[in-house]
Image (cartoon, rainbow, N blue to C red):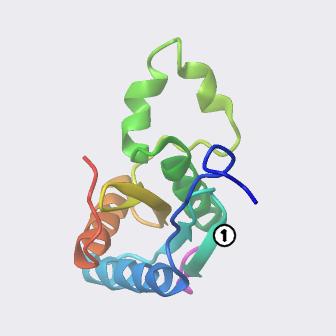
């Protein structure tokens, strides 16, 4: 039997919450006026839910997944990465093939705990951020600055 020193409890976004988040992003993107690719990952960066509207090409689909991965991997929104990579001590991280330093990626935070990642792509970085923030807020998740 494992003791407390060998394991840690983890919490992950449920499938139902991931799908609801995808739908909330789609609704927000429709209201803003752009086609969208949206990805939701678990805390380990593994895809939990994904959707791409018919009018979105394949590249934003990949970018959405990588935005979600970046946000959950570093537990910070992707739009702050532009400032991070300006620091020569951190700049080498920008060469990691999955790090995306463009707005639209957010950790999914509930009660102070990161339970997943959200990536939105298809509009401008500002539109992607707006749709992500609206969806997170609509479902009661924390909207990180």
Q: Quadrant of residue 75?
A: top left
Task: Pick the residue in front: 2 or 124.
Answer: 2
Q: Position of residue 29 (x, y in %)?
A: 34, 77
Tell me: 73 left or right of 138: right
Secondary element under disc 1, as helix, strand or loop, is helix
Tell me: 45 left or right of 27: right
Residue 105 lies in the magenta-colored region: no
Q: Quadrant of residue 137?
A: bottom left
Task: Pick the residue in front: 129 or 22.
Answer: 22
Q: Position of residue 85 (x, y in %)?
A: 48, 25
Residue in the picture at 56% in, 80% down: 52
Q: Position of residue 86 (x, y in %)?
A: 44, 20
Task: Pick the residue in front: 9 or 57.
Answer: 9
Q: Position of residue 72 (x, y in %)?
A: 51, 52
Residue in the picture at 55% in, 60% down: 10
Q: Main secondary structure of the magenta part?
A: loop
Circle 1 residue: 58
Tell me: 67 left or right of 45: left
Q: Which residues are magenta?
A: 52-56
Can you see residue 107? no
Residue in the picture at 28% in, 51% down: 144
* Badge count: 1
Residue 64's place in the image compared with 3, above or below, is below
Residue in the picture at 51% in, 12% down: 88
Task: Pick the residue in front: 79 or 73.
Answer: 73
């Amino acid at each position: 039997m494992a003791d407390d020193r060998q394991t840690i409890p983890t919490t992950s976004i449920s499938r139902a919450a991931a799908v609801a988040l995808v739908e909330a992003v789609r609704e927000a993107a429709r209201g803003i006026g752009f086609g969208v690719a949206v990805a939701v990952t678990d805390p380990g960066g593994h895809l939990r839910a994904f959707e791409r509207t018919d009018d979105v090409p394949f590249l934003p689909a990949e970018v959405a997944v990588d935005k979600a991965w970046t946000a959950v991997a570093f537990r910070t929104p992707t739009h702050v990465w532009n400032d991070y990579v300006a620091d020569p001590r951190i700049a080498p991280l920008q060469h990691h093939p999955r790090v995306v330093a463009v707005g639209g990626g957010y950790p999914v935070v509930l009660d102070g705990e990161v339970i997943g990642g959200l990536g939105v792509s298809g509009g401008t970085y500002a539109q992607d951020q707006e749709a992500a923030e609206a969806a997170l807020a609509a479902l009661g998740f924390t909207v990180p600055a």
